[in-house]
Amino acid sequence: MRFSDLRFLLAWLLPLLTLYGIMHTPAQAALWTLAIWISIALADAWVPGGARSPGPVDTASGLPYFRWVLRGYVLLQLVLIVAGAHAALQANWLTVLGVGFSVGFITGSQGITFAHELGHSKSKFDRLCAWVLMSSVCYGHFMVEHYRGHHPRAASPADPASAQRGESLYRFLPRTLWGSLASGWQLEAQRVAQFKTSWIRSPLTWSAAASLMPFVLAALYFPALTAIKIIAFFAVQSAVAFLLLEVVNYIEHYGLQRSQQDGRREAFGLMHAWNADHVLTNSMLANLQRHSDHHMHAWKPYPSLAALPGPQLPTGYAGCLLLAMLPPLWFALMHRRLDALPPATVPTP
């Protein structure tokens, strides 16, 4: 393991700072989160050399370290959510919403990213950790839809999580939110029928039940006003988290299309995902921005992903999230890049 690989521990810095903030100055939590988000975006864009991350590593010698960076985060997220709920108990409504946004930014940007990586692991423990993280943001169907739906269909019109050219973020979000939810439950229904099992044994059923528990417990064990604040906090942090996920989905395959012939899609290649190699966001997001390699080799551990010469984003994900929220600016930047890409290859039958 190289010294530069310690950079992945930066992923714990934001949740720890957020935890400190909501415990000491909850009224300012949202402002601090926005400041950190903008600072990361500016660092990606302007720090000399910041657009290039260290190369991939052989994970054999350091694999336990890389795994525990992700596994250790799971407990940190649960503590962060509990701390946020506690801060909401006596707070005014503006603070409740602010704390929900602040926690949701972490549970979305890092919690879902880590759940995504853990879910690709062959370890049952890692996949359980992924289910826990996704259940804590009320988005357990991602654990079905992403691996059995998105990966086979990415960069095609059949995928609700792939944005088409000219489709604004605000048109994409309703389509992907509903499409991913419906697809996740349909795919699980197919699995239940195929293996002649029951819904009571489905992890998706248990995930949905776990997501409901904070709402039920708050309603049962707290006075009405306090319960409403806890429910509002949990709902806001969950919504912020999965909306961040879907904005990232919008970015990752925007306008890219796998060709199709005789009803068959071509194999996923390096030209079918947008990439960025900015060191700060790659360190905090487990190399998620090396997205072409991830789709081409889905079981690859995150530190071994390579920066491939596929389509390149104008900046890292932190900045692209902001750009995508301004459709005219996003289209101006991205359509120029799309037009510069070589023509898609047609697969042989």
Image (cartoon, rainbow, N blue to C red):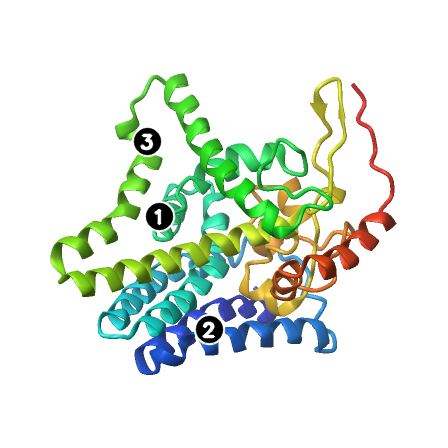
Q: Residue tagged by mark 1? A: 135
* CA separation in Å, label 2 and label 3: 35 Å
Lateral position of residue 142 relative to residue 100, left or right: right
Which residue occupies the foreground of this view, 208 or 223?
A: 223
Give the residue type at disc 1. Answer: Ser
Q: Residue furthest bottom?
A: 24
Residue 101 at x, y percent in the picture? 42, 66
Mark number displayed over residue 63: none
Residue 119 at x, y percent in the picture? 46, 44
Dividing the picture into quarters, in which one does residue 88 lie? bottom left
SS at mark 3 in the image = loop
Q: State the count of labels.
A: 3
Residue at 28% across / 29% down in the picture?
201
Within 10 angstroms of label 1, few (less than 14), some, or many (20 or more) residues?
many
Q: Residue tagged by mark 2? A: 13
Residue 303 at x, y percent in the picture? 58, 56
Indicate which disc, 3 or 1, sits on the residue closer to the N terminus.
1
